Amino acid sequence: MTLDIKTLTTAELHDEMLRLRQERHMDFLVNLIGMDWGEEGLGVIYMLESTTTGETATLKTVTADRENPYIPTVSDIWQIAKIYEREVYDFFGIRFLGHPDMRRIFLREDWVGYPLRKDDDPEGENPLRMDNEPLADTTTEYYLKEDGTVGTKENVIFQPEDHVVNVGPQHPSTHGVLHMRTQLEGETVLKIDPVLGYIHRGVEKICESLTYPQMLALTDRLDYFSAMQNRHAMCMCIEKAIELEVSPRVQYIRTIMDELQRIASHLIYYACMTMDTGALTAFFYTFREREELMKIFEDNFGGRVIMNYNTIGGVMYDIRPDFAQEVKKFCKHVRKRFKEYQDIYTGNVIAEQRMIGVGTISNADAISLGVTGPSGRASGWHNDVRKRHPYALYDQVNFKEIVRTEGDTNARHWNRMEEILESLGIVEQLIDNIPEGEYQAKRKPIVKLPEGDFYQAVETSRGEFGVFIESKGDKNPYRVHFRSNGLPLVNAMDTACRGQKFADLIAIGASMDFVIPDIDR
Amino acid sequence: MYNFKIVTDWFHSLLTGVMPEWLAIGIECLIVLLFIILLYATLAIVLIYMERKVCAFFQCRIGPNRVGKWGLLQVFADVFKMLTKEIIKMRQSDRLLHDLAPYFVLVASFLTFACLPWHEGVQILDFNIGVFFFIAVSGIGVVGILLAGWASRSKYPIIGAMRSGAQLVSYELSIGMTMLTMIILCGTMQLSEIVNQQAELGWNIFRGHIPAVLAFLIYMVAGNAECNRGPFDLPEAESELTAGYHTEYSGMGFGFFYLAEYLNLFICAAMAATIFFGGWAPLHIVGLDGFNAVMDYIPGFVWFFGKTFFIVFLLMWIRWTFPRLRIDQLLSLEWKYLMPISMINIVLMALVVTLGLTL
């Protein structure tokens, strides 16, 4: 099943997009993927979805000019496009007309060339630089003049007299090497400018030179707390493309493992949230329970963080005979401990004061910013991929999509906490009925995808993760794109934190629960 | 009870017998200095070890257990490590103030430390405005913290320093007021006199009943804030400001802040023990003479340390349970709640005392 892509010219792009947004309520920009089609030129694929009707649309636009490619921006229609278009500019050099902030985002600002273009030679043009990376306080905007030529304009990000604090890249509460340049007025946050790419590994570029089974190993290393689900997405995408049916046993195992992974991730979330707000003891409580889960993982496939479990057409090893028993024991254990977590942290008056009404994201903002997952559901947006586009066994199990409408830190926190219980419920429904069968479907040793574009999304622990593959029929892909679930979350930090206190910035960041390797990819 | 004053008087007369008085006092001062530094260091080691173990047990861990039996030598290893660390000099920092700042903090805690009545007759500084002196010198510490943040010329420390300035100055008010409440009850500011009174009449927390308990609770909150300890550790707030005002310190510069923090915890608890729980005075229950006689056999310093470490344990319990407040919440807690309550509490205590309602 390939994606049905409608082609637009660059001239009609903006009006058509605006029409889709307004008339067909395509208010969720799922993906904005930069492409290099060689002879055909450079282009962008847009994936849209309506949150009211559930309709989806995929469009693309191409510009043949490889020297000075210009495409009109859609960042005035969807806020999330601001950061997506910067990513495309960074990797493909496509300049978006009317985008207020055309800076590189992942690579150094003095980087030469655009590495995801097929004709680029990143190593040749960029020797190892021993000097510090310059960070500009101004940025360039390209806009279309009335006579049809392109003009440039300087936009100021920070004034010289602004008090800008570098939160990160080495900071205890950015959960990795995230760098947020934060403008402060006393303790109040005025503006956040995320600087990304400190652990950018170019996973999408690496994938282009790997075969499909080799690619799988990289997915675990994106959002490592959703390793299982990431890999599930990739496997499903490839299975869909080569029309490979997996056995019911594999479906059961995959669904259970996804949910166990979600529990593990949310337990880590709780630990980080409490630590970032200064309650260090609660931090250890969930790590204690997570350890039980890690033992189950380790027993079954040897991995604790990087699982390497799903394969194309199945899973790496069959589950152990005592798996069901161990998991049931774990579920019972967590349910018992669940109240303890609330006793020590959530019910605490200080914690409530720190969370309620802090970092509010409105429903419209959440959709426009593409904030998926529990964070988006805290703003009243029903965005669970498991409900929207059911995959694996999610259409056969009973579970509630946890949605709150407050949109604050407390809502995000409680969404995650309740999702632990929901996930436990799903696991308990499935664990006793795992059917017998093969754990690995028969397939050819060399996987070749048919020509076309393929996309598969899953609900990871922090939101929608998608794998986009464009294949030319070879044994390695032409272009791979991962919809990061963390990038929109980081992008939303600016909206959520403005006017809040500096300490809230940390709490909001914790409640967003982003994982940096997934953002940088 | 055994009065230690006999020993000091005997020692003084022994010295003056063989040398002029100024020399005798000089030697005594040196001995006291040695004693106070030794005690300070020992207590710091005990407290750090205790914090690590208590914290570990709260967090379902074992705590240090590798260096020495039960990890007893861990703190020595830490100190040794800290001594061997490179002192990092920042290019744009104010060297003099930067190096001086830890000493302000240390001096403040030394001076307050000297006020504590350890046992009957064992007190280094004891004069008729003892409580006043205690509050005054404890205020020097905030200068050190502000200087540390300012002289580092770095953004996180300055935020930490400003926070701590606001926090310490605010909570000093509550500390002062709760102490004033207890002074109304005792009628004296001399710390030795306050304890002597409690040895005769019973602990202040029982004598002053409702207002005293209220004052104690406020003191615990404000005292915790004065020590910069969780949930009031905003000046450090490691998850927000990396290490707050001492981010740019390395080696013993950091070590002094660390030391002073733990000793301030001890001093805060010891002061609570002194003015609320009778310092070295043993527990007496009216009517139970046998029980009282047994209690009298336990030496005063054991009582003092017992009470103090109990309160230290309470403060550690609080620290390892609660999440951190935000700066605006911290200030509104003080100015909108604690201060008005302690003001009313003073009036309440005055009424209790004038109407003769003390127990």
Image (cartoon, grey):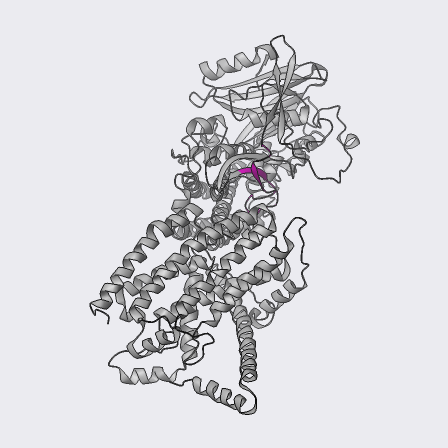
Q: Is residue B231 visible?
A: no
As drawn, the residue found furthest toward the bottom would be B17
Segment colored magenta? A157-183
Per the picture, the main secondary structure of the magenta-coloured stretch is loop
Q: Quadrant of the N terminus of chain B?
A: bottom left
- In front here: B258 or B108? B108
Q: Nearer the viewer, residue A176 or A476?
A: A176
Q: Residue B64 vs residue A92: left or right? A: left
Q: Position of residue A393 (x, y in %)?
A: 48, 34
Q: Is residue A492 visible?
A: yes
Q: Position of residue A9 (x, y in %)?
A: 61, 11
**Which residue is most to the top?**
A147
In the image, farthest residue toward the left: B355
> Percent from the top left, x then y, of residue B273?
39, 70
Classify residue B205 as left or right of residue B63.
left
Residue name at image x 31 percent, y 82 percent? B292
The reply, left or right, for residue A139 in relation to residue B304 is right
